[in-house]
Amino acid sequence: MKSKIYSLAVSAILLSACTAPEVTETYTPAAENALRAPAVPLVTIDPYTSVWSFSDNLNEENTRHWTGKNFPLLGGIRVDGKSYRFMGMEDFPVSPVIPTAAGGVWEGLYTEKQPAGDWMAVAYEAKGWKTGKAGFGSEGNPDLSTPWTTDDIWVRRTFDLPGDVSGESLYLQYSHDDNIEVYVNGTLVAVTGNDLDYNLLKEIPAEVVKALKPTGNVIAAHCHNNGGGSYVDLGIVKKEKRDNTFDERAKQTSVCVMPTQTFYTFECGGVQLDVIFTAPFLMDDLDLMTSPFNYITYQVRSLDGQEHDVQVYLEATPQLATNSLDQPVSFERIEKDGMTFLKTGTEEQPLLGKSGDDVRIDWGYLYLAAEQSPRVTMSIDEYYASKGAFMANGKLSGRTEDVSPDMQKQMTVLAYADNLGKVSSNTASGHVMIGYDDIYSIQYFGDNRMAYWKHDGQVDIFKAFADGAKNYADVMKRCNEFDGKMMQDAAAAGGQKYAELCALAYRQVIAAHKLVQDEEGNLLFFSKENFSNGSIGTVDITYPSAPMFLLYNPELLKGMMNPILYYSESGKWTKPFAAHDVGTYPLANGQTYGGDMPVEESGNMLILMAAIAQMEGNADYAAKHWDVLTVWTDYLLKEGLDPANQLCTDDFAGHFAHNTNLSIKAIMGIASYGKLAAMQGKDDVAARYTEAAREMAAKWVAMAADGDHYRLTFDKPGTWSQKYNMIWDRLLGFNIFPAEVAATEMAYYKTHQNKYGLPLDNRADYTKSDWIMWSACLTDTPADFTALVEPIWLYANETTSRVPLSDWHFTSNGSQRGFQARSVVGGYFMRLLHDKAKR
């Protein structure tokens, strides 16, 4: 989808705005991207400062944190006195039409077995379904009546209308745990991913409302429980009209996701509005890449040849600086160096006080900042009063005092308005910066470390934003150039659809990390294992994400490996294999995962050491850590050929022994050690370990052969799996496996694909899309690559699981199995890495 825009880049906690009366340059996407993203990146800074749109239209629902919790950013535009909403959705009063269980127990039909046919259709005959009262779920949920403890439940609620609803704005009100899809009279209205949420609202399309009948309507839902608690409740409410809300939405005409930018275009009131979200994620400039802000750009021009009076509005709530709504917040206005800063954060400020997976930051501060200008007004004001002032005259009250710290009692917003004045066919524009000062980012073995951009306190948040404002035009130019080059390279390597997938993955990968330094100045680039357990610095998260960093800055990959190397070399980790992680984000104080992955993590570290050496042309980094690498390699020599019953990176599928793909990893790890020894002139060592790897590879071929493919486990004929670890054999130049092994596997894979991809192995319908990208490179045949990658594009384009790209999905129906917003999709860049390694 094409667009001509420049984006509002939403960070999570500081907003700085700089405007100019007329823009001399109109920003447009550097390339095309026709992919309908499952969720669209807006503000992407780190695992905490992360804002996404989970819907097709930016103004269709609240913007959210990657976890799915509301992180509301609201945008409005006033054209000739009439206001339109272009981003987010306002809170508004509702009244029940068809009450949920909280308003009175309702009865429906349900089944916990996959129903045949169109189970969501009004005319469907639910034979064999049971009758139950809402809500359905596990103990601990509110208004629970019917226990549900299986993986899946299908629910049908038949209802009659209580009166005439024509002309009303109706919303589906639903609660879920976990993945849910909800239909009204057979039309899909809401899909929500892996999370627990109560009383969500989703507008029912006008055509669906119009088609409602006086009697015999049906709300039907399917909910999948990924583990833990479960819950389903369904109802319908209507929006009560009130003043001071952006009731009318601007018409979105396009959205385009580039690697560092997202472009939206809208039409309303005779003007075109372009909105651009820009994250300065340029990996050749670590100060810029780690900046605590994103840019939000807005561009307006007349579409009808007439002049129009235009003002733009943007607001953020303190929710962006809290973990939950019940936390009291504080506010402050700061005037500094010709700028106004509006600041908010929790009163408690529990510095590095929370660790875990489904949590958000509640220390540090959100700032909304702008250059002081007659065009700009700013306020800290009550939720509706702020909008009312803007709608009345395009200005804000300037109020900053006597606001409530209780978000549940009264939501207060940080608001910004820019009076663009008379807008003609010449584009008028402005831009905003929004970001976060987290004070301290990571605790590293008891030592609290600041974000990289602070340089141990030498740079404060005000200087960071001032520099960002000064360098805006240059950064936008550099981001646009990078986007264009990356898209061109990816399309040349794997085709347009491959490039579009890489564009969607890029910001997600970097934003799942935080860069700090240790006391000696070494880079520590910590990943967060998003929605898979919250671990920090997980080796088998580093491994799949590595291709992107090997391409654009191997120093960042070293930054991921440094904590694991230190953990062993310091004596804090004493086992003869690599640790799985160094803690639970943001506390990197030692492994917290419940099980070890000895072959997996040791092989990962050794392979990545060799990959870094190949990209840099020397083994200097490996030489610094040779002793611990030797310990890990000797472990693989002893245990790697036929692994015992242990976990691997695909641990969600459970423990099992004799894993052939894990055996390949061990062999690749040993060969990597041999390569590294050779690069250091250790010829005897190199010969010994390389020959050992060759002998193991020959044994592997004999042990794993199963006719027209190779087995999942050595001891089980008739099984199969993706052998994605074999990609390193050619990429690193080992060539110790016969070429026909990869060719045989590829031919077999192409006969076992489903609509949305190649299953991980024979045990289940689900897959890991990052591993498919590696498997697709096993042969050097473009047609093979395309055959495996295009179903991934189709999955991303059609999945009903509207979350930041999930790497774990069902290949038959394209729905999310689990995980979201993880950095492992950096593995999508394997084809680009593969092609670079060949040159």
Image: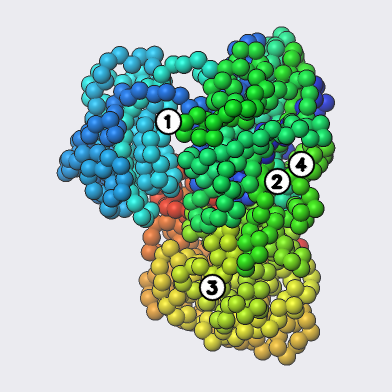
Cβ atoms at labels 1 and 3 below 8 Å apart: no
Residue topped by disc 2 = 292
Determine whether the residue tagged by mark 2 lies in a helix, strand or loop: loop
Tag shown at residue 479: none
In this view, the residue farthest toward the front is: 402
Residue topped by disc 4 = 462
Residue topped by disc 1 = 202
Residue 780 appearing in the image: no
Residue topped by disc 3 = 600
The answer to which quarter of the image holds residue 75 is top right
Q: Is residue 69 above or below residue 19?
A: below
Three-letter amino acid code at disc 2? Pro
Residue 184 in the image: x percent, y percent? 33, 30
Q: CA distance from mark 2 to mark 4?
A: 10 Å
Three-letter amino acid code at disc 3? Glu
User: Going from the N terminus, do you reach mark 1 or mark 3 first?
Assistant: 1
User: Going from the N terminus, do you reach mark 3 or mark 2 first?
Assistant: 2
User: Going from the N terminus, do you reach mark 4 or mark 3 first?
Assistant: 4
Q: Is residue 448 above or below residue 797?
A: below
User: Going from the N terminus, do you reach mark 2 or mark 4 first?
Assistant: 2
Please tell me whether mark 4 or mark 1 is closer to you in this view.
Answer: 4
